[in-house]
Amino acid sequence: MKHLLKIFATAAAAALTLISCGGADSAVTADEPQYAGYLFAYFEGSGEAEKQEQLRFALSTDAVNWTALNGNRPRTDYNGIGEISDVCVKRKIRNRMQDMGNEIFVKSDDRCDDGFKSLSERADKNIGGIKDKDEYAKIACEKWLDVRSFGQVFAFKSKGKGKDEEGVSVGVRGPVSIHQAVSISPVEVESMQITKSVNGESDGKKASDTMGTKHFVRFGLYEIKGAINVQLAEKTGFTHEDAEIVKECLRTLFVNDASSARPEGSMEVVKLYWWEHNCKDGQYSSAKVHRSVHVTAKDATALPESVDDYIITLDELPGLEPEIIDGI
């Protein structure tokens, strides 16, 4: 069972490398390189210095869809601390936005409800005729809640055949930033083989019983941090009502999110701490606000098995009181 404690950075630098592939008889010249795919090497790290600068790799054949080189196991660092990417968290927030009846731009394939098969098609059919970049960004923010929340890069090729026709290249910076989630204590990643009792094909041949392997974390308490930048909110049109939607999405983050790896009831939001400042620049820095919440294990020598094995304390910040909300 996994838990999330609170919502509201992590820095990442990335490098992209092409994987060259050629047989013994293949002639690869400088003018005609042969590539089999892409290797994505990236550094990420947050928190204590010794836990930073972790080198990770992923593979892709199209530079769009990526497969991690860890067998799709739950992410952990070298010290066993569990990790959930900010992209994963924002995917869940987008799904909840959509569940609540809001229009979003980045929809997962299984939740697509407008018939568009790609982001470029969705953008082209809705705002494709606008040439002015500022107007393009303005209308995109007005139409899609996730764009005015998280921002979006609209970078699509021109569908015309003329050499002079330009594609779309518009960037929107969103006010809502989400950090990657990290577990409070090291987690244990367990693996289980999946078997089947019937053949997948009717060719009369007996297939192998093993279908694959399932990986899961038996228990982990994860902490997520984030913030909303007022200046960027004014640029995208992000309102206080939008912030309330985001807050509700965080409170119900795992509603309608069950899967084989995350059965219903295995995930929950334990506590949501929500601060509202009385000025645009904030009464305290985001870092100081984040540090005001402390989560410690009651027994540092034992592996925690439930949220009851932790103690949560909150430092007082004069003039700034959080709203403490129980999650679902």
Image: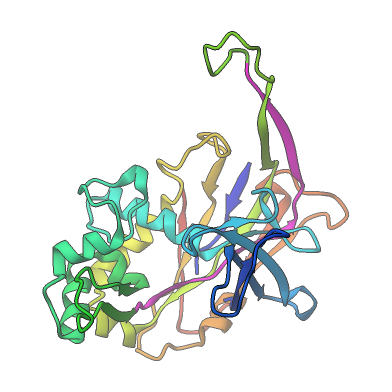
- Tell me if residue 234 comes above or below residue 8 in the rendering: below
Residue 7 at x, y percent in the picture: 50, 64
Residue 252 location in percent, x, y?
41, 50
User: At which x and y percent is residue 81?
Assistant: 74, 60
Residue 176 lies in magenta, yes or no? yes
Residue at the far bottom in the pictured view:
281
On the question of residue 192 being in view, the answer is yes
> Residue 139, image x and y in percent?
16, 74
96 in relation to 53, above or below:
above
Q: According to the image, what is the colour scheme of the structure?
A: rainbow
Which of 148 and 311 lies nearest the eye of the viewer?
A: 148
In depth, the one of 203 and 313 nearer the eye is 203
Name the residue rendered at 75%, 51% in the picture.
187
In-image side of 205 versus 186 (left or right): left
The quarter of the rendered structure image containing the N terminus is top right
| Residue segment shown in magenta | 173-196
